[in-house]
Structure formats: C-alpha cells, structure tokens
Image (tube, helix red, strand yellow):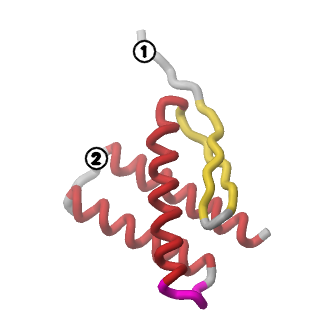
Amino acid sequence: MSVVSENKTVKVRILEKDVQVGCAADDEDDLTRAARYVDKSMNEFRNRNNAASVEKIAIVTAINIANELLKRKGDSSTDEKLVQQLASMQTLVQGALSDSQN
C-alpha cells in the first residue's frame, strides 16, 4: 500500500512580497529552503543592479540557479529531484512576477 502525500499551500517571501506556492506536505521544508535561496539570490542581483526590473531580476536569477544545478548534476542528468527543484523555483519566480505586476 502506498502513502499519498497531501498537497498544501505554503506562504514564502520573495523580494519583500508574499507568494503562496502549492507543494506536497512532505516537501514543505525543501520548498521553504529553496524560497530562501531564491530570495537571497534575487536580492543579491538587485543590490548589484539597482535599475533592474523585477522581471529581469527573476529571469537572471532563474537562469543562474538552473545553471548551478545543471553544473552539479551534469547536463545529461534527468534526476527527478533536480526536476522538482527547478519546477519549485519556476513556480516561485512566476509568483514573484505575478505579484509585481499587480
């Protein structure tokens, strides 16, 4: 018998904005840790590039994080954990972009 994990909504803070992200209940800690990393990376980029738009900050940060992950795993890797991490980060970036446009 397999155990099905419940989905839940987690509130994280990215670039001083609250973003709600859905995830499996047992992935909440990983998602929260990823959100802190994304927030830190986006803030570092914003501090270096004061004139950059939120959209540019999000895009450059997403590319940089994806590049870091791919370097660690190798370009040909299709590791499920890597795919999940990238999907979580993409969701966070999309949430930050959506909130900035409202």
Describe residue 50's horizontal placement relative to residue 80 as left or right. right
Residue 92 appears at what percent x and percent y? 57, 57
Q: Is residue 18 visible?
A: yes
Residue 29 appears at what percent x and percent y? 48, 39
Residue 91 appears at what percent x and percent y? 56, 55
Which residue in the structure is indicated by mark 1?
A: 2
> Which tag, 1 or 2, sits closer to the chain's start?
1
User: What amino acid is labelled 1 in the image?
Assistant: Ser
Position of 27 relative to 73 (above/below): above
Local SS, label 1: loop
Position of 59 relative to 11 (above/below): below
The prevailing secondary structure element of the residues shown in magenta is: loop
Q: Which of the 4 quarters of the picture holds residue 98?
A: bottom right
Residue 22 appears at what percent x and percent y? 61, 42
Outermost residue, bottom side = 51
Position of 58 relative to 11 (above/below): below
Split into 4 quadrants, where in the image is the C terminus?
A: bottom right
In this view of the protein, which residue sits in the foreground, 97 or 30? 30
Outermost residue, right side = 102
Which residue lies at the image location 52% right of the left edge and 87% below the top edge? 49
> From which residue to which does the magenta span run?
48-52
* Label 1 CA crowd tier, 10 Å (few <14, some 14–19, many 20+): few
* Label 2 CA crowd tier, 10 Å (few <14, some 14–19, many 20+): few
Which residue lies at the image location 72% right of the left edge and 64% below the top edge? 99
User: What amino acid is labelled 2 in the image?
Assistant: Asp
Which residue in the structure is indicated by mark 2?
A: 79
